[in-house]
Image (cartoon, rainbow, N blue to C red):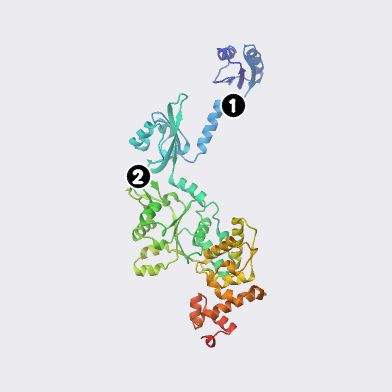
């Protein structure tokens, strides 16, 4: 049984209390004194004996009360501390002032690949094998920037928090070690917390339905995926959805735009760099996206812009999963699925000698073609309405809507910038206009001039009529430049039969050519 004796603090009172227990031949296994409490654990004490002991203890001067307690506070703290350490997935070590391991959680024991009894009492120098770093750590009172260390052949970033005695002297430190892939999981969670899956790909047209069906099947296959499509079609959105629908969905997802960085920065960003790799590098080095995404997915946007040197280095990684950091001499391995995207013809680049054919074969195991917006015209107005609602919410203005003429102008526009251009047009219109109904003029569509001159809002009765009028005006404008159904179909990116049908429908032919 464990008891709590409340006391008025005075010299010798704890000794008198223990003497009463000794007089009753009760063995005491633990005592904790935290004035105004004395906590005692006596295994042989039972409920009947507690009443008699209480009467005796209350006769001692300064004893105020005696009661039963479930657990001694020190034992409770130790239990909670052990549970807290055990729940930490990152390795945690407590070391004394001399740098000797005093406490280690289960993750630290697993990291060290040795029994706990061997780890406890081991000097840090022996554990991490970097005597200079440990000397600097101790010499600076366990205050150092984050550094990279090697333990059992694996890299870890470690941070230290100094422990101080009451007088201010350093008594040791708590060291937390982070594996690169664990850091990657946290960074990915912050960056992609609302990325979503295939439900974020908007559209009900047949091309988009086929794309989502094909992509959902390819997401399940653990092989490199190449996403082709014009700029602004949403290739990164597709990559996110494929990751979210894959067996790697719980692991990190990172993206690298190969066209946005020079070769040296792109290399260090993707592969990381070793300590002292270049001027300005972090002292302990830095893991790259491949290490951070271990077990997950790396998306290489605009992969066609990658330099020949990086192409060769990426090819080696795709061959066997191994790579070296910039300035490093140690082989590293990572289990990462590569998803890449391009708006260029990689086959033509191969012919021109600017892209490696063997790398193309490695990247193009699975392939998705994202349709341009002009090939999914039935999605234009629904997408515009979604973007309109978002823009109104973002700018804090009342919800607006599109006029019939504005919808017709949107449908007539060729959209070379695809969905991204549509979103920008809608946002600009919401920002610049205060009208509750956005009309053609609010959209500022230079490419839809034919639609604006051919239609006035008061002339439109139905959306179908507006679409037909804009369609006819567009064909009349382009036919003199492309005087055959095949040439016009190629210019508009549509099928020959569809254009021939519309030319007959609107009576457009050689007689209308100037």
Residue labelled with disc 2: 275
Q: Quadrant of residue 25?
A: top right
Give whichever of 453, 355 is nearer the camera. Answer: 453
Q: Earlier in the sequence, mark 1 or mark 2?
A: 1
Within-10-Å neighbours for mark 2: few <14, some 14–19, many 20+: some
Residue at 62% x, 68% y is 439
Q: Is residue 392 above or below residue 291?
A: below
User: 459 left or right of 179?
Assistant: right
Q: Is residue 304 above or below residue 191?
A: below
Q: Is residue 71 above or below residue 403?
A: above
Q: Which percent across, then down, holds residue 15?
A: 55, 13
Residue labelled with disc 1: 71
**Callout 2 secondary element:** loop
The answer to whether residue 94 is seen in the rendering is no
Within-10-Å neighbours for mark 1: few <14, some 14–19, many 20+: some
Mark 1 or mark 2: which is in front? 2
* Residue sticking out furthest to the bottom: 511
The answer to whether residue 350 is seen in the rendering is yes
Q: Which percent across, then down, holds residue 85?
A: 50, 35
Q: Quadrant of residue 389?
A: bottom right
Residue at 43% x, 67% y is 344
User: 154 left or right of 386?
Assistant: left
Give whichever of 491, 445 is nearer the camera. Answer: 445
As measured in the structure, the alpha-carbon distance from the residue carrying label 1 to the one carrying label 2 is: 50 Å
Q: Which percent across, then down, holds residue 13?
A: 57, 13
Q: Quadrant of residue 402?
A: bottom right
Residue at 65% x, 18% y is 65
Give whichever of 216, 394 is nearer the camera. Answer: 394
């Amino acid at each position: 049984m464990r008891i709590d004796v409340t006391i008025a603090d005075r010299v010798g009172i704890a000794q008198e209390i223990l003497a009463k227990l000794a007089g009753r031949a009760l063995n005491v296994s633990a005592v904790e004194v935290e004035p105004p409490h004395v906590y005692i654990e006596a295994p042989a004490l039972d409920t009947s004996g507690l009443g008699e002991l209480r009467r005796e203890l209350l006769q001692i001067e300064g004893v105020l009360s005696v009661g039963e307690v479930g657990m001694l506070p020190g034992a409770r703290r130790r239990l909670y501390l052990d549970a807290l350490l055990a729940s930490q997935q990152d390795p945690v070590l407590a070391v004394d002032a001399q740098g000797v391991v005093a406490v280690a959680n289960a993750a630290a024991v697993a990291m060290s690949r040795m029994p706990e009894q061997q780890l406890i009492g081991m000097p840090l120098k022996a554990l991490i094998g970097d005597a200079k770093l440990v000397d600097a750590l101790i010499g600076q009172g366990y205050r150092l920037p984050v550094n990279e260390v090697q333990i059992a052949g694996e890299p870890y970033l470690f941070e230290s928090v100094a422990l101080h005695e009451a007088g201010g002297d350093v008594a040791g430190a708590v060291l937390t070690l982070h594996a690169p892939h664990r850091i990657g999981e946290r960074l990915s969670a912050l960056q992609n917390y609302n990325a979503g899956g295939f439900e974020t790909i908007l559209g009900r047209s047949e091309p988009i339905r086929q794309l989502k069906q094909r992509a959902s099947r390819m997401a399940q296959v653990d092989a490199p995926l190449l996403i082709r499509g014009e700029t602004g079609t949403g290739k990164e959105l597709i990559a996110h959805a494929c990751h979210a629908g894959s067996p790697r969905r719980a692991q990190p997802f990172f993206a690298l735009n190969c066209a946005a960085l020079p070769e040296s920065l792109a290399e260090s960003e993707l592969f990381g760099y070793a300590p002292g790799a270049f001027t300005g590098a972090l002292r302990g080095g830095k893991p790259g996206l491949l290490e951070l995404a271990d077990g997950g997915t790396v998306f290489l946007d605009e992969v066609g812009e990658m330099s020949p040197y990086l192409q060769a280095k990426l090819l080696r990684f795709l061959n066997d999963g191994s790579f070296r950091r910039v300035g490093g001499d140690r082989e590293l391995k990572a289990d990462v699925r590569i998803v890449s995207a391009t708006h260029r013809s990689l086959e033509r680049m191969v012919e021109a000698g600017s892209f490696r054919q063997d790398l193309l074969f490695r990247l193009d195991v699975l392939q998705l073609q994202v349709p341009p917006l002009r090939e999914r015209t039935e999605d234009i107005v629904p997408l515009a309405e979604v973007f309109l609602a978002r823009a109104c919410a973002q700018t804090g203005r009342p919800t607006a809507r599109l006029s019939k003429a504005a919808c017709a102008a949107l449908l007539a526009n060729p959209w070379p910038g695809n969905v991204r251009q549509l979103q920008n047009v809608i946002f600009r219109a919401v920002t610049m206009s205060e009208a509750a109904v956005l009309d053609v003029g609010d959209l500022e569509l230079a490419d839809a001039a034919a639609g604006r001159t051919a239609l006035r809002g008061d002339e439109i009765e139905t959306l179908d009529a507006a679409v037909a009028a804009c369609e006819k005006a567009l064909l009349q404008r382009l036919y003199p430049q492309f005087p055959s159904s095949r040439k016009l179909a190629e210019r508009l990116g549509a099928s020959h039969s569809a254009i021939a049908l519309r030319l007959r429908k609107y009576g457009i032919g050689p007689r209308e050519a100037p």
